[in-house]
Amino acid sequence: MSELVTKEQIVRWMQIYAERVAAAKEMLTELDAAIGDADHGINMERGFGEVVLRLPELAQQDLSALLKGIGMTLLSKVGGASGPLYGTLFLRMAQGASGKDALTVDEFVAGLEAGIAGIQQRGSARPGEKTMVDALLPAMESLRTTLASGASLAGALTAAAAAAKAGMSATVEMQATKGRASYLGPRSVGHQDPGATSAWMMVQAAAETLIES
Ligand SMILES: Nc1ncnc2c1ncn2[C@@H]1O[C@H](COP(=O)(O)OP(=O)(O)O)[C@@H](O)[C@H]1O
Ligand SMILES: [Mg+2]
Protein backbone atom coordinates (compact mmCIF):
# COMPACT_ATOMS: atom_id res chain seq x y z
CA MET A 1 0.00 0.00 0.00
CA SER A 2 1.30 3.47 -0.78
CA GLU A 3 2.08 5.85 2.06
CA LEU A 4 -0.71 7.97 3.52
CA VAL A 5 -0.82 10.95 5.85
CA THR A 6 -3.66 10.27 8.25
CA LYS A 7 -5.86 12.53 10.31
CA GLU A 8 -4.28 11.05 13.44
CA GLN A 9 -0.84 12.07 12.17
CA ILE A 10 -2.00 15.64 11.58
CA VAL A 11 -3.36 15.69 15.16
CA ARG A 12 -0.05 14.31 16.47
CA TRP A 13 1.90 16.89 14.42
CA MET A 14 -0.04 19.68 16.09
CA GLN A 15 0.46 18.18 19.57
CA ILE A 16 4.21 17.79 19.08
CA TYR A 17 4.51 21.27 17.58
CA ALA A 18 2.51 22.87 20.41
CA GLU A 19 4.84 21.20 22.94
CA ARG A 20 7.94 22.40 21.09
CA VAL A 21 6.57 25.94 20.77
CA ALA A 22 5.71 26.08 24.48
CA ALA A 23 9.24 24.90 25.34
CA ALA A 24 10.75 27.48 22.95
CA LYS A 25 8.48 30.36 24.01
CA GLU A 26 11.26 32.37 25.67
CA MET A 27 13.69 31.79 22.82
CA LEU A 28 11.17 32.85 20.15
CA THR A 29 10.22 35.90 22.18
CA GLU A 30 13.88 36.86 22.67
CA LEU A 31 14.49 36.64 18.93
CA ASP A 32 11.46 38.90 18.40
CA ALA A 33 12.69 41.29 21.12
CA ALA A 34 15.81 41.96 19.01
CA ILE A 35 14.03 42.90 15.78
CA GLY A 36 10.31 43.10 16.59
CA ASP A 37 8.01 43.55 19.57
CA ALA A 38 8.95 40.57 21.76
CA ASP A 39 5.74 38.62 21.34
CA HIS A 40 6.39 35.84 18.82
CA GLY A 41 6.77 33.09 21.45
CA ILE A 42 3.72 34.37 23.29
CA ASN A 43 1.68 34.52 20.07
CA MET A 44 2.70 31.02 18.99
CA GLU A 45 2.12 29.45 22.40
CA ARG A 46 -1.32 31.05 22.66
CA GLY A 47 -2.32 30.02 19.13
CA PHE A 48 -1.12 26.43 19.18
CA GLY A 49 -2.21 25.98 22.81
CA GLU A 50 -5.71 26.85 21.67
CA VAL A 51 -5.37 24.50 18.67
CA VAL A 52 -4.49 21.62 21.04
CA LEU A 53 -7.55 22.36 23.17
CA ARG A 54 -9.77 22.18 20.10
CA LEU A 55 -8.18 19.03 18.61
CA PRO A 56 -10.47 16.44 20.27
CA GLU A 57 -13.54 18.17 18.85
CA LEU A 58 -11.96 18.93 15.45
CA ALA A 59 -10.71 15.36 15.05
CA GLN A 60 -14.32 14.10 15.07
CA GLN A 61 -14.71 15.60 11.61
CA ASP A 62 -13.01 14.97 8.28
CA LEU A 63 -9.46 16.10 7.53
CA SER A 64 -10.64 19.22 5.74
CA ALA A 65 -12.66 20.38 8.78
CA LEU A 66 -9.73 19.56 11.06
CA LEU A 67 -7.28 21.60 8.98
CA LYS A 68 -9.79 24.43 8.58
CA GLY A 69 -10.40 24.49 12.34
CA ILE A 70 -6.65 24.72 12.99
CA GLY A 71 -6.34 27.57 10.48
CA MET A 72 -9.32 29.50 11.85
CA THR A 73 -8.07 29.10 15.43
CA LEU A 74 -4.67 30.54 14.48
CA LEU A 75 -6.32 33.34 12.53
CA SER A 76 -8.52 34.34 15.46
CA LYS A 77 -6.26 33.66 18.46
CA VAL A 78 -2.86 34.97 17.39
CA GLY A 79 -2.57 38.73 17.52
CA GLY A 80 0.60 39.09 15.47
CA ALA A 81 1.32 38.91 11.75
CA SER A 82 2.30 35.27 12.15
CA GLY A 83 -1.24 34.12 13.10
CA PRO A 84 -2.95 34.97 9.82
CA LEU A 85 0.08 33.66 7.91
CA TYR A 86 0.21 30.26 9.65
CA GLY A 87 -3.60 30.26 9.59
CA THR A 88 -3.50 30.61 5.80
CA LEU A 89 -1.16 27.62 5.53
CA PHE A 90 -3.73 25.35 7.19
CA LEU A 91 -6.76 26.88 5.45
CA ARG A 92 -5.13 26.23 2.08
CA MET A 93 -4.23 22.68 3.10
CA ALA A 94 -7.89 22.17 4.05
CA GLN A 95 -9.04 22.94 0.52
CA GLY A 96 -7.60 19.73 -0.92
CA ALA A 97 -8.79 17.50 1.92
CA SER A 98 -12.54 17.68 1.61
CA GLY A 99 -14.30 14.46 2.65
CA LYS A 100 -11.01 12.67 3.37
CA ASP A 101 -9.53 11.06 6.47
CA ALA A 102 -6.09 10.64 4.93
CA LEU A 103 -4.02 12.17 2.14
CA THR A 104 -1.64 10.50 -0.26
CA VAL A 105 1.91 11.81 -0.05
CA ASP A 106 1.32 13.72 -3.30
CA GLU A 107 -1.83 15.32 -1.89
CA PHE A 108 -0.07 16.23 1.37
CA VAL A 109 2.86 17.80 -0.47
CA ALA A 110 0.51 19.66 -2.84
CA GLY A 111 -1.36 20.95 0.22
CA LEU A 112 1.84 22.21 1.83
CA GLU A 113 2.84 23.86 -1.43
CA ALA A 114 -0.56 25.56 -1.75
CA GLY A 115 -0.29 26.65 1.89
CA ILE A 116 3.13 28.22 1.41
CA ALA A 117 1.90 29.92 -1.77
CA GLY A 118 -0.98 31.26 0.35
CA ILE A 119 1.49 32.66 2.91
CA GLN A 120 3.34 34.40 0.11
CA GLN A 121 0.14 35.80 -1.38
CA ARG A 122 -1.07 37.07 1.97
CA GLY A 123 2.24 38.54 3.16
CA SER A 124 3.81 39.20 -0.27
CA ALA A 125 7.24 38.12 1.03
CA ARG A 126 9.76 36.87 -1.49
CA PRO A 127 12.85 34.83 -0.59
CA GLY A 128 15.58 36.89 1.06
CA GLU A 129 13.30 39.29 2.95
CA LYS A 130 14.01 37.71 6.35
CA THR A 131 10.69 36.00 7.04
CA MET A 132 9.26 32.53 7.65
CA VAL A 133 9.25 32.14 3.86
CA ASP A 134 13.07 31.81 4.00
CA ALA A 135 12.70 28.60 5.99
CA LEU A 136 9.56 27.28 4.27
CA LEU A 137 10.61 27.59 0.62
CA PRO A 138 13.92 25.70 0.98
CA ALA A 139 12.04 23.03 2.96
CA MET A 140 9.50 22.67 0.18
CA GLU A 141 12.17 22.45 -2.50
CA SER A 142 14.07 19.84 -0.51
CA LEU A 143 10.88 17.85 0.11
CA ARG A 144 10.07 17.66 -3.59
CA THR A 145 13.62 16.73 -4.61
CA THR A 146 14.07 14.08 -1.93
CA LEU A 147 10.69 12.49 -2.61
CA ALA A 148 11.46 12.41 -6.34
CA SER A 149 14.62 10.44 -5.54
CA GLY A 150 12.44 7.74 -3.96
CA ALA A 151 12.73 8.58 -0.24
CA SER A 152 9.92 7.90 2.24
CA LEU A 153 7.90 10.87 3.47
CA ALA A 154 9.57 10.57 6.90
CA GLY A 155 13.01 10.66 5.28
CA ALA A 156 12.06 13.52 2.98
CA LEU A 157 10.62 15.57 5.85
CA THR A 158 13.81 15.00 7.85
CA ALA A 159 15.84 16.39 4.94
CA ALA A 160 13.32 19.23 4.56
CA ALA A 161 13.74 20.13 8.23
CA ALA A 162 17.50 20.38 7.69
CA ALA A 163 16.87 22.64 4.69
CA ALA A 164 14.48 24.78 6.75
CA LYS A 165 17.12 25.06 9.47
CA ALA A 166 19.73 26.20 6.95
CA GLY A 167 17.20 28.72 5.59
CA MET A 168 16.50 29.92 9.12
CA SER A 169 20.22 30.40 9.80
CA ALA A 170 20.61 32.30 6.54
CA THR A 171 18.10 34.93 7.78
CA VAL A 172 20.75 36.20 10.23
CA GLU A 173 22.60 37.98 7.43
CA MET A 174 19.45 39.26 5.71
CA GLN A 175 17.97 42.72 6.02
CA ALA A 176 14.25 42.61 6.77
CA THR A 177 12.04 44.28 4.19
CA LYS A 178 8.70 42.82 5.34
CA GLY A 179 6.89 42.90 8.67
CA ARG A 180 7.83 44.70 11.85
CA ALA A 181 11.57 43.95 11.55
CA SER A 182 11.70 46.03 8.35
CA TYR A 183 11.29 49.18 10.50
CA LEU A 184 14.87 48.59 11.68
CA GLY A 185 16.27 48.67 8.15
CA PRO A 186 19.98 47.72 8.17
CA ARG A 187 19.89 47.24 11.96
CA SER A 188 17.83 44.09 11.40
CA VAL A 189 20.98 42.41 10.03
CA GLY A 190 22.78 40.11 12.48
CA HIS A 191 19.63 38.65 14.07
CA GLN A 192 17.82 35.40 13.30
CA ASP A 193 14.22 35.85 12.19
CA PRO A 194 11.74 34.58 14.79
CA GLY A 195 9.16 33.44 12.22
CA ALA A 196 11.77 31.51 10.23
CA THR A 197 12.67 29.82 13.53
CA SER A 198 9.09 28.78 14.34
CA ALA A 199 8.69 27.64 10.70
CA TRP A 200 11.77 25.40 10.97
CA MET A 201 10.31 23.95 14.17
CA MET A 202 7.05 23.20 12.35
CA VAL A 203 8.83 21.20 9.63
CA GLN A 204 10.93 19.46 12.29
CA ALA A 205 7.76 18.50 14.21
CA ALA A 206 6.25 17.08 11.01
CA ALA A 207 9.37 14.96 10.46
CA GLU A 208 9.26 13.67 14.06
CA THR A 209 5.57 12.81 13.69
CA LEU A 210 6.19 10.72 10.60
CA ILE A 211 9.24 9.02 12.11
CA GLU A 212 7.40 7.91 15.24
CA SER A 213 4.36 6.52 13.39
N1 LIG B 1 4.75 39.78 5.21
C1 LIG B 1 5.24 38.69 5.82
N2 LIG B 1 5.40 37.54 5.13
C2 LIG B 1 5.88 36.43 5.74
N3 LIG B 1 6.24 36.39 7.04
C3 LIG B 1 6.09 37.51 7.75
C4 LIG B 1 5.59 38.71 7.21
N4 LIG B 1 5.56 39.65 8.19
C5 LIG B 1 6.03 39.04 9.30
N5 LIG B 1 6.35 37.77 9.05
C6 LIG B 1 6.87 36.77 9.99
O1 LIG B 1 6.24 36.93 11.23
C7 LIG B 1 7.22 36.95 12.25
C8 LIG B 1 6.76 37.82 13.41
O2 LIG B 1 5.63 37.24 13.99
P1 LIG B 1 4.93 37.88 15.28
O3 LIG B 1 5.96 38.44 16.19
O4 LIG B 1 4.07 36.80 15.85
O5 LIG B 1 4.02 39.02 14.68
P2 LIG B 1 4.23 40.62 14.74
O6 LIG B 1 5.37 40.92 13.81
O7 LIG B 1 2.95 41.19 14.28
O8 LIG B 1 4.55 40.96 16.17
C9 LIG B 1 8.47 37.46 11.58
O9 LIG B 1 9.62 36.99 12.24
C10 LIG B 1 8.36 36.94 10.16
O10 LIG B 1 8.97 35.67 10.01
MG1 LIG C 1 6.14 40.21 17.18
Image (cartoon, rainbow, N blue to C red):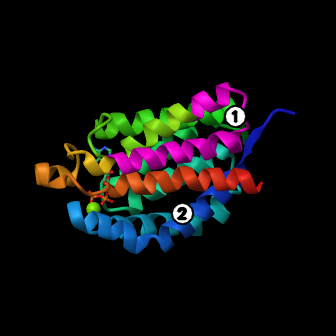
Alpha carbons under labels 1 and 2: distance apart: 24 Å
Mark 1 burial class by Cα count in 10 Å: few <14, some 14-19, many 20+: some
Name the quarter where the C terminus is drawn. bottom right
Mark 2 burial class by Cα count in 10 Å: few <14, some 14-19, many 20+: many
Relative side of 180 to 97, left or right: left
Give the label, 1 or 2, closer to the camera: 1
Q: Is residue 141 above or below residue 72?
A: above
Q: Which mark is residue 145?
A: none
Q: Which residues are magenta?
A: 143-170
Name the quarter where the N terminus is drawn. top right
Q: Is residue 36 visible?
A: no
Q: Regarding mark 2 in the picture, which secondary structure is present there?
A: helix
| Secondary structure character of the magenta stretch overall | helix
Q: Is residue 171 magenta?
A: no
Mark 1 or 2 closer to N-term?
Answer: 2
Q: Is residue 155 above or below residue 192?
A: above
Q: Residue at x 69, y 42 (%)?
A: 155
Q: Which residue is denoted by mark 1 in the rendering?
A: 105
Look at label 1 and name its amino acid.
Val
Residue 124 position within the rendered picture, expressed as x and y whole percent measured from the top left: 28, 35
Q: Is residue 166 magenta?
A: yes
Label 1 CB sits under 8 Å from any ligand 1 atom = no
Q: Regarding mark 1 in the picture, which secondary structure is present there?
A: helix
Q: Residue at x 26, y 47 (%)?
A: 173
Q: Which residue is denoted by mark 2 in the rendering?
A: 51
Residue 210 position within the rendered picture, expressed as x and y whole percent measured from the top left: 71, 50
Q: Is residue 128 above or below residue 165?
A: above
**Which quarter is ligand 2 in?**
bottom left
Look at label 2 and name its amino acid.
Val
Furthest-top residue in this view? 148
Q: Residue at x 61, y 47 (%)?
A: 65
